[in-house]
Image (cartoon, rainbow, N blue to C red):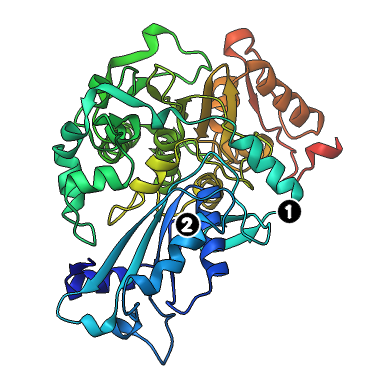
Amino acid sequence: MPRAISEDEANEILARPEGQFWDDKSAKSKGSTIQKIGCAFANADGGEFAVGIEDRNKAASGLDRWQGFASEEDGNFVHQSLVKDVDPGVPYAIDWLEIEGQVKRGIVALVTIQKSASVHKTASDQAWIRRGAQNFQLDQQGMVDLSLSKGTRSYEDQMLDRYTSEDLAAEAELCDFLATYSPATEPPDFVHKQRLDDKEGRASVAGAVLYAEAPSVVVPKKCAIKIARYETQELTPKREHLQGTPLTIEGPARLQIEQTLGAVTEMVEALSIMEPGGSLVPAHYPPEALKEVIVNAVIHRDYNISDDILVWVFDNRIEVRSPGVLPGHMTLENLLSERFARNPTIVRLLNKYPDPPNKDIGEGLNTVFAKMREAKLQEPKIATTGTTFVVTLGHTPLARPHELVMEYLSSHDEITNRIGRELSGIASENTMKDVFLKLAKAGQIERVPDKAGSKSAWQKPADAQTSFDVASS
């Protein structure tokens, strides 16, 4: 029997925009269309689609788009398309929905597809993958790459011996989330449908990370976020640079992200950065960039590594250290052009919140780079060290160090190595000295007489020109 939902719930479903995890199709769709979208979701990160909803156009808008099947039997081809006509069959579940009191509008099949460890092909031997709101056909090399990237299961799928599906269904975060979820679903049904438990009643790591009040208590791994403030610009901080006691952020993934953003923002607002003109101003990092880096750390970290995410706030930069090397086929070279979710269930279900922190799927690091450029700051630095993925947001202007030095000297009598490093973000004294020497060779600056060693400084000569080209000197 189909499940009756309210007209408001139906409208919420109709209002969902097509994207990485959602699509809708007409009840008149062919089996080949169902095969394609089923394979695309299973080959990517999973997702949902409804069969029985017409495209938005002049002929069908609002509730009139709900044009479902006359009976469940009429929609049986959806089952066949996902089981018999796809090789291998995709992992799926179907919820049959009708609008309460409006039976004539028909029954809509709400299909949930799970990410699969296999590479799925349609009856025509084609493999498809979901990227954004579109399905893309994979060529032979694409299928090879996908096979390699699916070589291991994520730790998020592991079941927990001391945390049951009943425990998960009772979590306040899950209940609060489902109060906003459409169609209305009871916590136990949601847990089972989203495969956050198993037949033995054990809950998964993904379920605990997303909804448990204290994930580190039920997951036998560290999975909190630690925030530390270091009063230094040194690349390797010492213990004496640590200000106060590091904060530990526990809780469901959504709250971890929100609370970490709040704590880091508060620390940053207390910082002062020297401008090229020499004045001290409050530090400012693009909030979108900071958010994306923290979101990525939470949703893409390797939960099989027993370590916390580390956020270090320095005088001139923020470092976010996430446990785990790059997953699948991802490399530092293709990081901005390719995408691969180590934890597809966490990514997909976090995206179901009314205002999801991972709203723009696949655009995270691209957004970070773009926002840093808009703020006239240098691009973030991305690196892997051992089993850690590190993103560094530096408060370093886009201008060349030579330009920053000359701008500072336009309103100050002299500049020291320390001030030069503070302006430019250069960590090495010798590297900063090289900048001064090049400017001196170009005739733009000279040493301040009678100042040497640690007190050495540079000044503009009386006859210095106002324009220069250090590169040609």
The answer to which of 36 and 308 lies nearer the viewer is 36
Specify whether residue 150 is in view. Answer: yes
The mark closer to the camera, 1 or 2, is 1
Q: Is residue 103 left or right of residue 338?
A: left
Q: What residue type is disc 2 on?
A: Gln
What is the x, y in percent for residue 124? 67, 62
Q: Which mark is residue 294?
A: none
Q: Quadrant of the C terminus?
A: top right
Of the image marks 1 and 2, the number of the one nearer the N terminus: 2
- Horizontal side of residue 335 vs 349, given as left or right: right
Mark yes or no: residue 416 visible.
no
Which residue is painted at 50% across and 43% down in the image? 116
Residue 424 vertical position relative to residue 307 in the rendered view, above or below = below
Q: Which residue is mark 1?
A: 139
Q: Position of residue 225 (x, y in %)?
A: 33, 26
CA gap between label 1 and label 2 equals 20 Å
Residue reaching furthest bottom? 59
Q: Crowdedness of circle 2 by 10 Å Cα count: few (<14), some, many (20+)?
A: many
Please, what is the three-letter code of the amino acid marked with disc 1?
A: Asp
Q: Secondary structure at mark 1?
A: loop
Vertical comparison of 180 with 151: above or below: below
Which one is nearer the viewer's eye here, 337 or 292? 337
Task: Looking at the picture, tell me which residue is in the foreground, 227 or 449.
Answer: 227
Which residue carries the number 2 mark? 20
**As drawn, 191 above or below 320:** below
* x 58%, y 32%: residue: 382
Is 305 situated left or right of 14 in this image? Answer: right
